[in-house]
Image: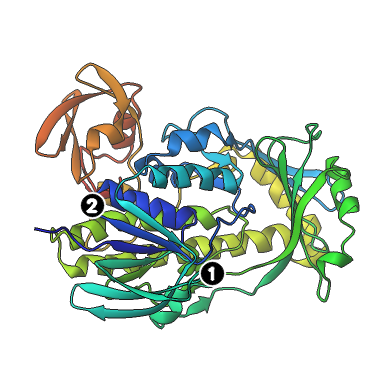
Amino acid sequence: MSGPAPVVVVGAGPVGSTAALLLARRGLPVLLVDRRSQPYGLPRAVHLDDEALRALADAGVAGEFLARSRPMAGLRLLDARHRVLAEFRRRPDAGRHGWPQASMFHQPDLEDVLRAAVARTRRIEVRRGAEVVGIEEADRSVTVTLLDHGTGAPRTVVASAVLGCDGARSTVRDLVGARMRDLGRPDRWLVADLRSAAPLPVWPGVHQVCDPDRAATFMPVSGDRYRFEARLLPGETPEDVDLPALLAPFGARDAEVVRAAEYVHRAQVADRWRHGRVLLAGDAAHLTPPFVGQGLGLGLRDVHQLAWKVADVVTGAAGEDLLDTHQAERAPHARALVRLAALVGRLMTGGGAVAAPLRRIVLTVLARVPALAAYATDSRTPALRRGPLVDRRGRAGRRLAGTLVPRARVRVDGRECRLDDALGDGPAVLEAAGDALVVEAGGRRRVVEDVDGTLTAWLRAARATRVAVRPDRIVRSAR
């Protein structure tokens, strides 16, 4: 008996490649297609938090990613004269998931890691230089028409599902009639990627210049790479900007400019994420301003929370209605973070000259209150809303359901590992049984030792004794 038809993943960027790996690790054949004949070699995303890293971990590439990235030191807010308004430091050691709370990286490095993982995964076929030009849905299948750019010949593929991970100009989104809805005004910025053989004399975190006349951001990325961004004035072009003068305060006047281009930061979320077995993820479903660094992270969360649902539906383990939860869960979460990014941008850079003195006072107070300063560097994102897969009833449910279970250190059968290894690939239950913790997963019950007390403290703070965990490590319910 033959297996299921392949899942067609459209777009071989970080989100699409991660989706392909997650699906293949669940036993599904995958056809990964991309309109480009060669990988896109220029950097875009530079930041990833430890929640989104759970997706890369389940895709099997977190360790390789961390080897080519570096922990983010925190955020420093500067006024127009580059005087420090506030500084929010991140601890360099691991956060609640066992990794730095935030990592800086060069996107082509991440794509190299993902491309190598895809190449060694037997269930994934890659077809580059092929553009999707047609999608026709049938009962429990999708017929995809591809146009080969090299030969000009069309090819049809019968797919068990289609994931549109093909970016801001998504063809899949257009073909299913979905549209982007604005949550804020577009914002034009100059983005420059730099290299410097000698380390630049700057604080190792992100510098945000809160200048309403010329808002700017400067950050060390990884290795000898740096990123500079500056808001463009009305009618101004990148060629009009005196870039060396703007780089001078960071000691980067003589740095090599690898690329300088105009980017339009948008705040948008798609009105439809699912059409039958065609689903959108990543920039095809949402676009966010850069101020909270969640652009790529949102996309990785999309596919991490979608891959197991697609696998269950395709294999018959769940009904078609499971796919309804994709937009129901991910769209509100994306809207919340897109709106937050837009708000943070306005608070840090808006208001004109009148707002500058007030901003200095408010930020000074924030930096001096430990609880508020900790919130500014916390990598946790809002919990998923209540729904069929998120039961937020009761005190414990309201505190934990819809959030990620900590990737804590545990000891199982005398071997130390992370909780994810004990939870396995499917649904699981974590329960406090007296002084012990028990994991029930894959039909087995095993006692786990909470090595450093992280899980015990997490349960106790929510007054929970039992949590049900989904395959994507999201808490389904707690009591």
**Rendered residue at 15%/66% (across/down):** 319
Q: Which of 128 and 444 is in front in this view?
A: 128
Specify few, some or many for label 2: CA neighbours under 10 Å numbering under 14, 14-19, or 20 or more: few
Relative image position of residue 146 (x, y in whole percent):
40, 73
* Residue 160 located left or right of residue 339: left
- Quadrant of res 312: bottom left
According to the image, label 1 marks what residue? 168
Relative image position of residue 75 (x, y in whole percent):
66, 43
**Rendered residue at 19%/42% (across/down):** 428
* Residue 357 located left or right of residue 470: right
Residue that extends furthest to the front in the rendered view of this protein: 151
Give the secondary structure at mark 1: loop
Q: What residue type is labelled 1?
A: Ala
In this orientation, does residue 473 appear? Answer: yes
Q: Earlier in the sequence, mark 2 or mark 1?
A: 1
In this orientation, does residue 395 appear? Answer: no
Q: Nearer the viewer, residue 387 or 277?
A: 277
Relative image position of residue 359 (x, y in whole percent):
74, 55
Is 338 above or below relative to 429?
below
Q: Which amino acid does label 2 sit on?
A: Gly
The quadrant the N terminus occupies is bottom left
**Rendered residue at 30%/53% (across/down):** 23
Give the secondary structure at mark 2: helix
According to the image, label 2 marks what residue? 394
* Residue 4 located left or right of residue 145: left
Q: Nearer the viewer, residue 343 or 41?
A: 41
Is 5 above or below relative to 102?
below
**Disc 2 to disc 1, C-alpha distance:** 40 Å
Q: Nearer the viewer, residue 464 or 195?
A: 195
